[in-house]
Amino acid sequence: MNWHTFRDSLRLSNEAEIHPHVPQESAESFQSIDTETTEIEYLDLLYGVVRAVKPKAILDTGAHKGYSAIAMGFATRDNSMSGCPSGQVTSVEKSLEYFGQAAEAVRHAGLSNYVKVRHGDTLTILRDEDGARRFDMVYFDSSRACRTAEFQYLLEKGSLVPRSILAFHDTSPLRKPKSERDRNVHSKYLRKVKDTAEICSEKLIFNLSRGLTIYRL
Ligand SMILES: C[S@@+](CC[C@H](N)C(=O)[O-])C[C@H]1O[C@@H](n2cnc3c(N)ncnc32)[C@H](O)[C@@H]1O
């Protein structure tokens, strides 16, 4: 099995039918597994980024059912099969139910040597490790209220190697809020992701669908 055969086996829905969007986000041209999992187009992109950049230690915050970890895990495996020193994805999930589903999905995909799923809150796990581990790519996809705090913690602890790749999901500036609280959470999140750009050397911003922002530290 590889990323392409794995993704072809998934049952996908049209993004516009499962998530609120405005027309400018072109959500009807995107496909998703469910409302939480990253759109398939952005999973393809994460797969490609890992293949192109060859990161050794990837952190995935918010495993949910394991699909972003699996996309990056297949890319890590393919990198190692083409002679790159072996990399590893660490995926963290705070819900016990989703942690179990993600761990099983990773095992089923044959990626146990490349992806470790950990149960708990990302910040608590990082604090327990006290900066002992360094990452060269992070996909921030836990809750929007936590993601920039995770980034700040990693930065302050020196847990990000120079020129690390930082990918933040759900960065569409046009997002249709579900409530007033959602509007506030989203605008605070977008402001912090935008502020992060100031200390980054490269930026690639995708505004379609739920949006994805990729920086290089
Ligand atoms: C948007 S989903 C992640 C989707 C996944 N990255 C994918 O594309 O396959 C967010 C997940 O993060 C988890 N989560 C939320 N806050 C968290 C935290 N502080 N630490 C770890 N997991 C968290 C939620 O339980 C949920 O399953």
Image (tube, helix red, strand yellow):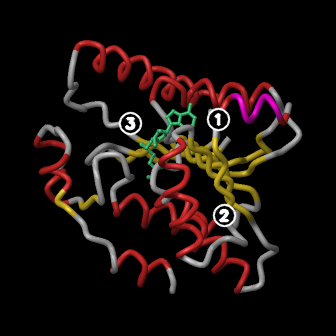
Give the spatial CA distance, label 2 vs label 1: 16 Å
| Element type where label 2 sits in the image | strand
Range shown magenta: 124-128
Q: Position of residue 175 (x, y in %)?
A: 25, 32
Specify whether residue 150 is in view.
yes
Disc marking residue 171 = 3
Residue that label 1 marks: 122
Amino acid tagged 2 = Val
The one nearer the camera, 114 or 102, is: 102
Mark sitting earlier along the chain (3/2)? 2
Specify whether residue 215 is in view.
no
Magenta-span inclusion, residue 80: no
Q: Position of residue 33 (x, y in %)?
A: 30, 60
Give the spatial CA distance, label 3 vs label 2: 25 Å
Amino acid tagged 3 = Thr
| Element type where label 3 sits in the image | loop
Tell me if 127 is positioned left or right of 186 in this view.
Answer: right
